[in-house]
Image (cartoon, helix red, strand yellow):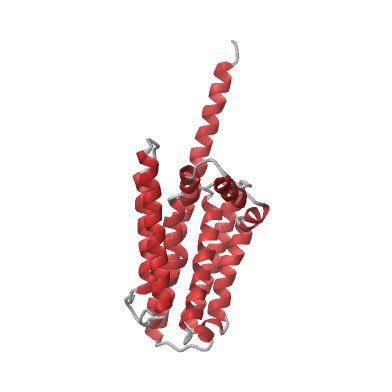
Amino acid sequence: MGTGHQAGPAQWAAAIAMAGAVAAYLAAAARLRRRGDAWPWLRDLSFTTGGTAVATAAAAQLPGGQFTSHMLQHLLVGMAGPLLLVLARPVTLVLRVLPPGRTRRTLLAVVQSRLAAVLVCPPVAALIDFGGLWMMYRTPLLAATHDRPWVHALLHLRVFAAGMLFTTALCRLDPMRHRYSLALRAGTLVVASAAHAVLAKSLWASPPPGLVFPAADLRTGALLMYYGGDLVEVGLALVIVLGWYAETGRSLSRERRRMDAVPG
């Protein structure tokens, strides 16, 4: 995943891996439906769209100048793509498709392990994600990988993994060991959004250390990061609020059933 360069072997490998993940997801969803289980088609669409966005960012020549195309890649790989993938609940799908046995128990143990609980703690996930972005853009790290395609691809793989982790921590859709509160998740989103906005504004003023871009390209990329990040963060906020609303409704329904069961 480069900054405006032609796709090389590392970029194509990332795109092919993502295409394989989409194919595996669709096959698992089809298998679930064949045996008579329900699985919303919108989740298939969400995963396919997210996977396509990430694969396109990996291998396609994106529009705009060098920094603008890089920032569009950042938004697709680290923010929009992860949101669409997480909305499709891939871990839940795998757990439902796998038959009872060692593989399923192992996956569930990993997902609900203490380490996973720490990693999906919203402040921890936010620090990994946005702390990494600050290191990438406000230190010479990005410049050091500029002419090393495989190292640059690994850097963007880290952006993707951190974006998936942060989105998973906030959306709380797949099975988790610990259910973090609405207040913690919402507060983390507010702080993380502010950090992302400040980083975008800093890039408007000066490029990443060691790199030089035309002023118009730099400012367009910074604006894309600022407003594109806002758009994805609004999507995350909606997921959090809708999840809270659904959970509150279920709690009220359970309470009504409990009250109805009490003899008059």
Residue 73 location in percent, x, y? Answer: 41, 72
Q: Which residue is drawn at 46% across and 51% down?
A: 90
Q: Report if residue 66 is visible in the image.
A: yes
Q: Quadrant of residue 6?
A: bottom left
Q: Which residue lies furthest to the top in this view?
A: 264
**Toward the viewer: 75 or 189?**
75
Residue 110 location in percent, x, y? Answer: 61, 52
Residue 131 location in percent, x, y? Answer: 59, 70
Q: Which residue lies furthest to the right in this view?
A: 114
Q: Report if residue 227 is visible in the image.
A: no
Q: Quadrant of the C terminus?
A: top right
Q: In which quarter of the image is residue 226?
A: bottom left
Q: Residue at x 55, y 46 (%)?
A: 104
Q: Vertical placement of 217 versus 243: above or below? A: below
Q: Vertical placement of 1 versus 25: above or below? A: below
Q: Vertical placement of 219 versus 160: above or below? A: below
Q: Vertical placement of 18 versus 243: above or below? A: below
Residue 211 location in percent, x, y? Answer: 48, 88
**Toward the viewer: 170 or 51?**
51
Count of labels shown?
0
Q: In which quarter of the image is the N terminus?
A: bottom left
Q: Residue at x 58, y 22 (%)?
A: 258
